[in-house]
Amino acid sequence: MINTQSKIFGNALAVSTQRMAEENGMVRFLRQPLGVEWTPDNIEDLYADRENFKWLPNNLELIDGDEESLDPPVDLATFKATILAEYQKTMYTRFRQAEYPPIEEYIDGIVKGDQAQVDAYIAACQAVKTKYSKEMTHPGDENVKDDGSATV
């Protein structure tokens, strides 16, 4: 399933930490141990894990994971807030993308001059936006369908 909580959070984590590293002249080394799922509930553990999550100078030619981590470029509160904001944005975006009607339906209505078809497309998009608001919470992995949509 493409929209499980750990996949969405993992994506948000990767994007956010890469941005934090680049803004501070660093690179980040991120290794997910087998059997460990990253979720919003374990951000503090991740922040403190200097074996699997490291901040490194950006002038290294080769990174093998044995390097000593520099201090994080941000404090825990900023780290958490940044990742959670990206997670929220990524979550509603991915669920919406899975359920939006194909754009071809809209274009077909425009080309044919079929205002009813265009209006139906817009209404379908608005329904998706309502279903997956920007303030949504993850519906739980058990409610995520294989196509990425959810039964909420």
Image (spheres, rainbow, N blue to C red):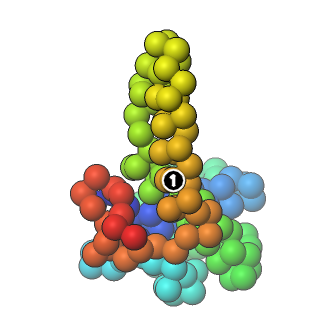
In which quadrant of the rendered view does residue 101 lie? top left
The residue shown at (49%, 85%) is 42
Determine if residue 86 is in view. no
Q: Residue at x 49, y 20 (%)?
A: 114
Q: Residue furthest front?
A: 116
Q: Position of residue 98 (x, y in %)?
A: 39, 49
Task: Judge by depth and name the residue closer to the eye, 60 or 7.
Answer: 7
Left or right of 17 on screen, residue 151: left
**Which quarter of the figure is the C terminus placed in?**
bottom left
- Residue at the (45%, 78%) spot, across then down: 39
Residue identified by numbered label 1: 127
Is residue 24 positioned above or below 141 on the image? above
Horizontally, residue 36 falls left or right of residue 131, namely left
- Asked whether the viewer can see residue 110, the reply is yes
Where does residue 9 sit, x and y in percent of width and height?
47, 68
Q: Where does residue 2 sit, x and y in percent of width and height?
A: 33, 57
Residue nearest the viewer, comparing 89 with 43: 89
Answer few, some or many: residues within 10 Å of disc 1's Cα (few below 14, many 20 plus, some between 14 and 19): some
